[in-house]
Amino acid sequence: MTSPMYILHGAGPVAAMQDKLGWYLMIVSIIVVVVVGILVLAGARRRHDGRDQVARSGSGMRWVIVGGIIVPATVLVVTFALTIATEDATASPPADPAVTVQVIGHRWWWEVKYLADPAHTVVTANEIHIPVGQPVRVELSSADVIHSFWIPQLAGKTDVIPGQRNVAWLEADSPGIYRGACTEYCGLQHSNMAAFVVAESPAQFAEWLETQAKSAAPPSDPDAAAGLAVFQKSACAACHAIRGSDALGQVGPDLTHLVGRMTLAAGALENTRGNLTGWIANSQAIKPGNDMPTMTLSAGDLQALVSYLETLK
Ligand code: CUA
């Protein structure tokens, strides 16, 4: 849905450092496998020829010391040093990140909070907007079980652990949508727990953040107004918040700017009116086991509700 997940096309400085280490490890591993393969074949042939007494001679001993101790030890020490250096360089963002985002793992979606402006906490879900070319600090925590946050084109995996705050660093070199996923098995819908990073120009990002900080305007259309009443009197408001309405639920995603999102249900569905209607009517058929109950609404109430939700731009 929306964009494929690329694993080998790094698109930011963190991914570039990790890519470099990955390719180094890959090349060293291939060389080791090839060399060991050649030695095993040569050894088998020599035994076949009955010439294994060479192993006990002086040149045989040199082979053992150089090939068996010095070379492997050097490769291991260099690999260790490069790994530590890469981990150190990518562990946390530069001291002065442009943006700090809190990402909270839930079964099975991501809550996204921006703390840049304390007066207006922006809350959204599954889509993390960032300014291009600037370091973004991502503070990860979990509301339930262990998840793992991975946007492969931007950075490696970071575990998302209940009761603990882990920090990741994202930075994109160019604008685009970077798809990621939860990569720690977290239950039935683990595979439907996508995350998207939307990298845009700093001006577009600032505009997006400003829009997101606004409350939802009361609907002017009578159908949508009826939908708001349905939302507030049904189970919806117990779990979802819409800033600007009486709905303050904290269990499910904040819906204040629902229409601006690309997908519903953490990447499971494209965000269209039809999919939204189907999701409300029977989300358990689409993403079994999710926390949203099956809503028993009349057809009229359901359409009014969707008309209201479609005003949440
Ligand atoms: Cu969350 Cu797997």
Image (cartoon, rainbow, N blue to C red):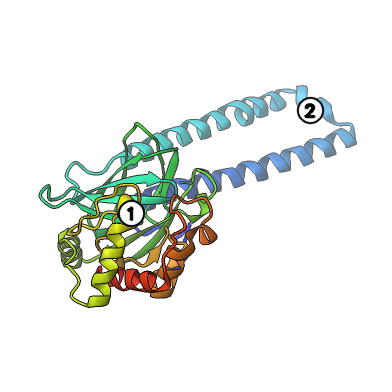
214 up-or-down from 299: above or below: above
Point out the image quarter for the C terminus. Answer: bottom left
Name the side, left or right, on which 36 lies relative to 257: right
For residue 128, say whether it is visible.
no
Residue to which mark 1 is pinned: 253
For this rendering, which residue is in front, 188 or 117?
A: 188
Please tell me whether mark 2 sits on a helix, a strand or a loop: helix
The residue positioned farthest toward the left in the image shown: 119
Whole-percent x and y of residue 241? 26, 54
Crowdedness of circle 2 by 10 Å Cα count: few (<14), some, many (20+)?
few
Residue in the image at 29% along x and 51% along y:
112
Q: Which of marks 1 and 2 is nearer the N terminus?
A: 2
Whole-percent x and y of residue 26? 54, 47
For residue 309, say whether it is visible.
yes
Image disc number at residue 54: 2
Whole-percent x and y of residue 270? 43, 69
Q: How far apart are the alpha carbons under marks 1 and 2?
A: 72 Å
Disc 1 beta carbon < 8 A from ligand 1?
A: no
